[in-house]
Amino acid sequence: MTSIESSPISHSYRGRFAPTPSGPLHFGSLIAATGSYLQAKSQQGKWLLRIDDLDTPRVVPGAASQICKTLERYGLHWDETIVYQSQHFERYQAIIETLKQQQLTYYCRCTRKEIKAIGGIYLGHCRKLTNSADQSSIRVRVDQPLDGFFDKLQGEIAVEPHLAEEDFIIRRRDGLYAYNLAVVVDDHQAGITEVVRGADLLSTTVRQRHLYQLMRWPEPDYLHLPLAVESHGHKLSKQNHAPALDLDNPEPQLWLALKFLGLKPPLELHQAPVEEQLEWAGSKWNPAQLPCQREIELSDISRQA
Ligand code: GLU
Ligand code: ZN
């Protein structure tokens, strides 16, 4: 007999980590990787790796293989074969065609500058025009204001007003597919049941849910982990040159990541092999103990280390 309180273990749990290969992984990426890994493993689920190399001009040669090497060095071994978004362009196009046949998309020629000049929110200017594909982006219609959603860690999330009604881009003017489209198509294709990622992507979720609903695909659950920020509130990111994860000495960084995720790793694990640390973390993992702030200053975590 199962009690209502105990959360049932799902044997078909499928989670993933989806880094963009625009540079090496940093501590912020380690939190997303470790959090999604532990969440999947605690459900006896699969943890998949997808390389989000969609935005080809931003892809740094060699970054994808360095990311894989780093994950392995940190003991984060993925299941199944690695998926690359750059191999799915036909699939994205097919989904756009499906939406187009239902008159849910249109070509837009408005430039960022033009949209900025009218206040920064796109008001559907091209909806009634019959632009050709040439030099146009493709937008998907948002006919009803988008709904907020429930995040398993952050709770009820309201839609940011400027996102609620804006028809958004699913293929850019330069022909690149938009992140929101690709991530939905790929997560659906991979049968992802829960998306665990950093809170920097929280606001993108409402648009992704819109695409699931238009496609009538089952939606995954969402859990957005707090973001590691520097003491002055700046997000750790490749853009602000967060240091790459150390390949020679991964143990203390993994230990710190576990601490960040609300676990209390004992001091003697600080230099313990990563496999041992992850095994310990797996036995203690409880998403209810995750810190639910959107941001955590790294200095707060390391000071106590
Ligand atoms: N590739 C995205 C990024 O690196 C993450 C995609 C996702 O987790 O939805 O920010
Ligand atoms: Zn337009």
Image: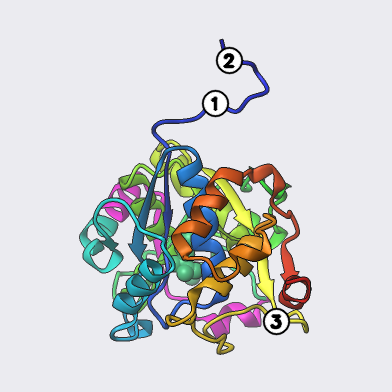
Hey, what amino acid is under mark 2?
Answer: Thr
Residue 81 image position (x, y, % from top left): 24, 56
Question: Does the residue at mark 1 contact the one at mark 3 (Cβ under 8 Å)?
Answer: no
Q: Residue at x 37, y 64 (%)?
A: 130
Residue tagged 1: 8
Q: Considering only order in the chain, which callout, 3 or 2, is on the residue closer to the N terminus?
A: 2
Residue ranking furthest to the front: 268
Q: Considering only order in the chain, which callout, 3 or 1, is on the residue closer to the N terminus?
A: 1
Q: Look at the numbered disc 1 and give the secondary structure of its residue.
A: loop
Q: Considering only order in the chain, which callout, 2 or 1, is on the residue closer to the N terminus?
A: 2
Q: Is residue 117 left or right of residue 177?
A: right
Hey, what amino acid is under mark 3?
Answer: His
Hey, what amino acid is under mark 1?
Answer: Pro
**In the foreground, 114 or 145:** 145
User: Which stretch is magenta?
Assistant: 94-119
Question: Does the residue at mark 1 contact the one at mark 2 (Cβ under 8 Å)?
Answer: yes
Q: For the residues marked 1 and 2, what is the alpha-carbon distance in whole angstroms?
A: 8 Å
Observer-side mark, 2 or 3, equals: 2
Q: Residue at x 34, y 53 (%)?
A: 186
Q: Is residue 176 above or below residue 99?
A: below
Q: For the residues marked 1 and 3, what is the alpha-carbon distance in whole angstroms?
A: 38 Å
Residue tagged 3: 234
Residue tagged 2: 2
**In the foreground, 284 or 52:** 284
Q: Which mark is residue 282?
A: none
Residue 171 image position (x, y, % from top left): 37, 67
Q: In the rendered view of the protein, which quadrant contains the N terminus?
A: top right
Q: Look at the numbered disc 3 and give the secondary structure of its residue.
A: loop
